Image (cartoon, rainbow, N blue to C red):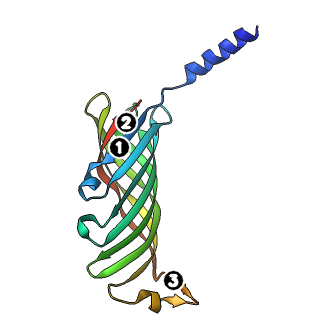
């Protein structure tokens, strides 16, 4: 009797289980700007996935720039098939950066969340082309000063180096063209 109940339980569980899809991707647009990316996306339902993208650079083309970005995301696919056709995504971001641009240094962190829209084209059975863009509300805390200033001397308060720029801004989010390979 116990064997029959156990067999029935496993059969019921297998009927409700869905196949997990796992894909790894790289964002070709960011890779062209010498900012390597690596991402993973996994199904969590019939129409949805969760993913994590990590990107970073160190002195691309010899420019004074360092950046590390982490972006988790939830996606909902309208077609009823994950990793196929049109989707909308909700995501977050955390960025650590040290960038010198036009004689000014921006050194700090940014964080926030946004909405992504995109379309996934099926190239082969396992290969996908993912075009996406979105907007995010981003907060930041950073040191801003002109190159050549003695920031560590000028902005020390009670022995602690303080950030002098904080704020919130609406900005582009997850702009790119990714190439994905489905493992399973």
Which residue is located at x 48 percent, y 26 percent? Answer: 19
Element type at marker 2?
A: loop
Quarter occupied by residue 173:
bottom left
Q: Where is the N terminus found, in terms of image quarters?
A: top right
- If you read the primary sequence from the N terminus, does the residue marked by circle 1 or circle 3 appear first? 1
- If you read the primary sequence from the N terminus, does the residue marked by circle 2 or circle 1 appear first? 1
Name the side, left or right, on which 57 lies relative to 102. right
- Mark 2 to mark 1: distance in Å? 12 Å
State the count of labels.
Answer: 3
Residue 109 to residue 129: above or below: below
Residue 58 spot, x, y in % from top left: 33, 65
- If you read the primary sequence from the N terminus, does the residue marked by circle 3 or circle 2 appear first? 2
On the image, numbered disc 3 is attached to which residue? 162
Residue 177 to residue 123: above or below: below
Q: Are marks 1 and 3 in contact (CB under 8 Å)?
A: no
- Mark 3 to mark 2: distance in Å? 44 Å
Element type at marker 1?
A: strand
Circle 2 packing at 10 Å, graded few (<14), some (14-19), many (20+), is many
On the image, numbered disc 2 is attached to which residue? 83
Circle 1 packing at 10 Å, graded few (<14), some (14-19), many (20+), is many
Residue 175 spot, x, y in % from top left: 31, 55
Name the side, left or right, on which 54 lies relative to 119. right
On the image, numbered disc 1 is attached to which residue? 25
Name the side, left or right, on which 94 lies relative to 146. right
Residue 127 spot, x, y in % from top left: 30, 34
- Mark 1 to mark 3: distance in Å? 38 Å
Depth check, mark 2 against mark 1: the one in front is 1
Residue 42 spot, x, y in % from top left: 46, 38
**Which residue is farthest bottom?**
154
Quarter occupied by residue 114:
bottom left
């Amino acid at each position: 009797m116990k064997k029959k109940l156990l067999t029935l339980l496993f059969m019921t569980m297998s009927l409700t289980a869905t196949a997990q899809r796992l894909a790894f991707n790289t964002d070709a647009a960011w890779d062209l700007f010498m900012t390597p990316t690596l991402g993973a996306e996994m199904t969590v339902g019939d129409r949805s996935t969760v993913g994590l993208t990590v990107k970073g650079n160190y002195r691309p083309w010899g420019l004074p720039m360092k950046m590390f970005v982490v972006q988790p995301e939830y996606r909902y696919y309208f077609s009823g098939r994950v990793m196929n056709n049109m989707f909308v995504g909700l995501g977050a971001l955390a960025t650590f950066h040290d960038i010198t641009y036009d004689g000014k240094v921006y050194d700090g962190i940014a964080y926030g969340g946004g909405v992504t829209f995109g379309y996934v084209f099926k190239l082969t059975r396992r290969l996908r082309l993912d075009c996406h863009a979105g907007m995010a509300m981003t907060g930041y805390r950073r040191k801003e000063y002109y190159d050549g200033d003695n920031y560590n001397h000028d902005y020390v308060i009670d022995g602690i180096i303080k950030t002098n720029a904080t704020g919130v801004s609406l900005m582009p989010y997850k702009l790119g063209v990714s190439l994905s390979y489905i493992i399973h």
